[in-house]
Image (cartoon, coloured by chain):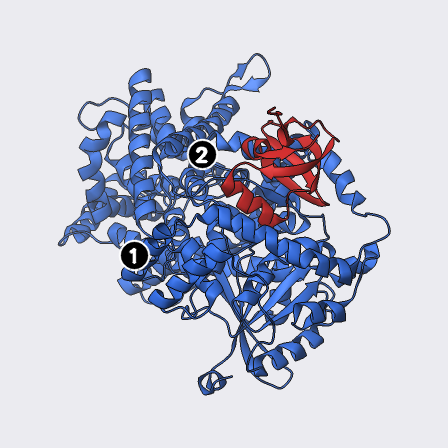
Chain colours: A red, B blue
């Protein structure tokens, strides 16, 4: 009954998915203001050299997210 | 426009998202007619400038920090919110020019719609018309203007295209008596009831502004305590949950304006921007990325450390010439010496930093302008966070290898206040160029010139060890500060990586100009005062002790049949001993004896408080080397250096007769100089950047105590 959603953090490089919702309300406020909304197409580009930071594309804009931030975005993939 | 507004200079605010090209437009409109001021209470700068409208009217333009929304997530964005939530704020504008990147318009209009609901006279400047044309994006400004109910100008702040049209529109905007646009967002039932209650009880006319107070009452600086309590009571009484409403409102605004954008903007046939992706595949690559960054930083370091030596040598010799000339033409008097040894030397000490600051800021702004800095943050955020800092801090720390002064000034780009403060506090640990002369003498004195493993010289290894000690001290202090400092500010990254662009030269020059003049006028004042003070302490003694010292020195010189030059240096040495600075050195002796230092080193420590490089010069005076300003690093002065070394080797403690400069003493001094905050310029800059004396004083105390403890441990290990 409870389906476990994937998060942006679990996307592999070049994998795309649509954002469903953002768990953390503070981050939701920040990310929606930047244009990452439910329904936005997200593409994982790469991880940072020291890990824990992700380079993603959301509807053509490029964003750097921390691990916690990437984990907070649920996707439909 | 009211009568009151007509008589004063109208205020226009530039508002927009980060990366909208807002600052380029600001620089284009105001040119050199701008200044940077601190926003009261926080250390984020607001730039203001002036320009003339076509009709001849002068207007004031304020460049507010880039923000995505009136629901702020950083100190920068909070400024925007506090200005617009309070119509009596000194920065509250008469009209707003909202700058948006036309190539990402669907992501740039959220804040615009919020400002519309505050009923401000507003126009939309669609920036980057040139980029839109290149990628084949078409926009119907008339349609956008009609749908949003505000004037829309398509322009380019890089090429200057259509800027005259913007000026005409601003002129019309200022003449408008009321705003015709309708409410963009309709408050839901709960929001309406909260806003209504705040309007009734807190005297706010606009419903959306009342709603903003419900969201932000807890931190807005302008709110009086009773108003804050009133709003707090309303919010808790109505069970108003700020974050949930923020997100809902944001999503609803998107739902409203996305169709407007879609109707007015025809996207390019093919999605462009592949150049940025190709560049990033290399520059942010897992392994190549850090290597390329290291190479770029090596180049920056080379520029600050090596290339700047030409103008720096020129400035120093020009001031030395000025000082000599003044001395030759003015009568021998203490006022002359105040001018030549105090003021001119102090001025030289300020201006000598200008080439380094200019070069550093030129290169850093260049990297910022092209969009590379955001990638550095992305790559190093995780690494630096372990030490209480963020990705941007790495730039400051590396710049600190040249000089902490420009490095600390470059910490402005760090958004999070705690991360920025830690960066400011630990940067002075990094080995700067002023420590090098001190290291050169001390290492040359006690470290044998032998090879390790056949290739490495022991002296260069010690040198490298001193650099490593600096980095270690900086990172571990960062780690400790991270553990003890508390912050209300949430830490997040969520950073936009802009498209790579060619740098805009006007922005570069204006930034360099702004940083250099800020340093000269603000930090320079304090450096000048301290150097005059130190001069006075070294030039005067209590009572007639100074004259007695001279008489005594001359008598001894006659007895020893010294040459006139040697006599003069003996007099200088005796006078320094008799001066207030000498007395302070002697008073310090019991305190520094556990570290292995005598009173002469005490004087050198005291005089080099203002600048570390003074250490060598002071020792040269104390050991009677004639030229008080002996530059120990200069190749031409190698003889002086050799003599200074001989004198230092021969130096013995007056009571025990043991040599002063043993391996233990020299290592202890090395550690002391590596860890101590001996730089008045840095303290002055920290004071400027943090806005209070609290932080530089704490930093000074902490670093001095650490240096003392470190030197004591090393002395006792090697003795």
Say which mark, if any, is on residue B388. 2
The location of residue B239, given as percent across then percent down, is 39, 49
Where, by quadrant of the figure, is residue B577 drawn? top left
Viewed as shown, does residue B222 lie left or right of B369?
A: left
Q: Is residue B705 visible?
A: yes
Residue situated in front as seen by the camera: B567 or B507: B507
Of all chains, the one bearing label 1 is: B
Which label lies toward us, 2 or 1? 1
Question: Which badge, 2 or 1, comes first in the chain's sequence?
Answer: 1
Q: Residue at x 51, y 75 (%)?
A: B94
Where, by quadrant of the figure, is residue B453 drawn? top right
The answer to whether residue B83 is above or below residue B716 is: below
Q: Are marks 2 and 1 on the same chain?
A: yes
Query: Which residue does the numbered mark 1 point to in the structure image?
Result: B229
The location of residue B310, given as percent across then percent down, is 58, 50
Say which mark, if any, is on residue B420. none
Where, by quadrant of the figure, is residue B420 drawn? top left
- Few, some or many residues within 10 Å of mark 1 (<14, 14–19, 20+): some
The location of residue B679, given as percent across then percent down, is 38, 45
Q: Residue at x 27, y 50 (%)?
A: B538
The answer to whether residue B445 is above or below residue B542 is: above
Quadrant (top left/top right/bottom left/bottom right) for the C terminus of chain B: top left
Please count the marks in the image.
2
Residues at marks 2 and 1, CA–CA distance in whole angstroms: 35 Å
Q: Is residue B401 visible?
A: no
The location of residue B401, given as percent across then percent down, is 51, 38
Residue lying at the far left of the rendered structure: B543
Residue situated in front as seen by the camera: B679 or B218: B218
Asked if the residue under mark 1 is in contact with the one under mark 2, i.e. CB atoms within 8 Å, the reply is no
Q: What SS does tag 1 mark?
A: helix
């Amino acid at each position: 009954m409870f389906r476990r959603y994937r998060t942006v953090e679990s996307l592999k490089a070049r994998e795309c998915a649509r954002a469903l919702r953002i768990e953390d309300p503070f981050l939701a406020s920040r990310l929606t203001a930047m244009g990452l909304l439910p329904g936005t197409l997200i593409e994982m580009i790469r991880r940072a050299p020291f890990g824990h930071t992700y380079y993603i594309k959301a509807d053509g804009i490029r964003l750097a997210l921390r691990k916690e931030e990437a984990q907070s975005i649920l996707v439909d993939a | 426009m009211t009568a009151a507004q007509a008589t004063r200079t109208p205020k226009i605010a530039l508002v927009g998202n980060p990366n909208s090209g807002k600052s380029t437009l600001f620089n284009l409109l105001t040119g050199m007619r701008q200044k940077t001021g601190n926003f009261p209470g926080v250390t984020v700068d607001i730039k203001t400038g002036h320009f003339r409208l076509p009709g001849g009217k002068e207007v004031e333009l304020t460049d507010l920090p880039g923000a995505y929304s009136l629901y702020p997530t950083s100190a920068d964005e909070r400024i925007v919110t506090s200005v617009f939530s309070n119509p009596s704020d000194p920065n509250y504008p008469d009209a707003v020019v909202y700058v948006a990147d036309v190539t990402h318009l669907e992501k740039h209009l959220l804040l615009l719609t919020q400002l519309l609901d505050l009923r401000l006279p507003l126009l939309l400047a669609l920036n980057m018309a040139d980029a839109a044309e290149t990628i084949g994006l078409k926009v119907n400004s008339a349609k956008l203007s009609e749908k949003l109910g505000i004037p829309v100008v398509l322009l380019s702040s890089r090429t200057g295209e259509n800027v005259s049209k913007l000026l005409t529109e601003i002129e019309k905007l200022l003449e408008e008596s009321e705003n015709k646009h309708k409410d963009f967002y309709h408050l839901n039932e709960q929001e309406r009831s909260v806003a209504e209650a705040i309007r009734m009880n807190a005297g706010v006319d606009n419903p959306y502004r009342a709603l903003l107070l419900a969201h932000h009452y807890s931190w807005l600086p302008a709110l009086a305590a009773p108003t804050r309590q009133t709003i707090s009571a309303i919010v808790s009484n109505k069970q108003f949950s700020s974050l949930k409403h923020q997100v809902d409102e944001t999503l609803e605004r998107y739902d409203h304006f996305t169709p407007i954008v879609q109707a007015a903007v025809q996207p390019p046939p093919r999605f462009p921007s592949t150049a940025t992706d190709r560049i990033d595949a290399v520059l942010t690559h897992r392994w190549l990325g850090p290597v390329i960054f290291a190479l770029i930083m090596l180049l920056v370091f080379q520029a600050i450390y090596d290339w700047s030596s030409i103008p720096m040598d020129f400035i120093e010799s020009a001031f030395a010439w000025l000082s000599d000339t003044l001395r030759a033409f003015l009568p021998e008097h203490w006022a002359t010496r105040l001018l030549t040894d105090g003021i001119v030397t102090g001025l030289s000490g300020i201006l000598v930093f200008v080439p380094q600051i200019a070069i550093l800021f030129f290169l850093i702004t260049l990297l910022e302008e092209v969009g590379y800095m955001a990638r550095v943050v992305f790559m190093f955020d995780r690494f630096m966070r372990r030490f209480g800092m963020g990705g941007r801090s790495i730039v400051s720390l590396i710049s600190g290898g040249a000089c902490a002064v420009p490095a600390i000034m470059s910490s402005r780009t760090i958004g999070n206040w705690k991360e920025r403060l830690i960066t400011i506090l630990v940067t002075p640990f990094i080995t700067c160029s002023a420590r090098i002369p001190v290291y050169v003498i001390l290492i040359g004195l006690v470290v044998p010139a032998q090879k390790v493993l056949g290739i490495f010289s022991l002296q260069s290894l010690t040198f490298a060890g001193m650099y490593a000690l600096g980095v270690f001290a900086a990172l571990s202090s960062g780690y400790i500060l991270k553990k003890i400092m508390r912050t209300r500010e949430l830490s997040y990254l969520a950073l936009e990586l802009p498209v790579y662009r060619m740098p805009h030269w006007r922005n570069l020059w204006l930034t360099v100009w702004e940083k250099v003049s800020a340093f000269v006028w603000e930090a320079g004042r304090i450096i000048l005062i301290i150097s005059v003070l130190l001069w006075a302490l070294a030039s005067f003694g209590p009572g007639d002790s100074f004259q007695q010292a001279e008489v005594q020195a001359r008598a001894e010189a006659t007895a020893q049949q010294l040459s006139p030059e040697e006599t003069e240096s003996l007099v200088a040495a005796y006078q320094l001993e008799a001066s207030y600075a000498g007395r302070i050195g002697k008073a310090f002796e019991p305190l520094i004896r556990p570290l292995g230092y005598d009173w002469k080193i005490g004087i050198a420590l005291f005089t080099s408080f203002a600048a570390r490089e003074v250490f060598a010069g002071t020792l040269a005076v104390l050991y009677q080397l004639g030229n008080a300003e002996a530059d120990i690093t200069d190749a031409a002065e190698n003889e002086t250096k050799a003599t200074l070394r001989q004198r230092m080797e021969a130096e013995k403690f007056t009571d025990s007769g043991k040599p002063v400069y043993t391996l233990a003493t020299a290592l202890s001094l090395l550690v002391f100089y590596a860890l101590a905050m001996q730089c008045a310029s840095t303290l002055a800059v920290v004071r400027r950047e943090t806005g209070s004396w609290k932080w530089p004083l704490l930093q000074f105390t902490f670093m001095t105590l650490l240096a003392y403890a470190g030197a004591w441990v090393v002395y006792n290990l090697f003795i």
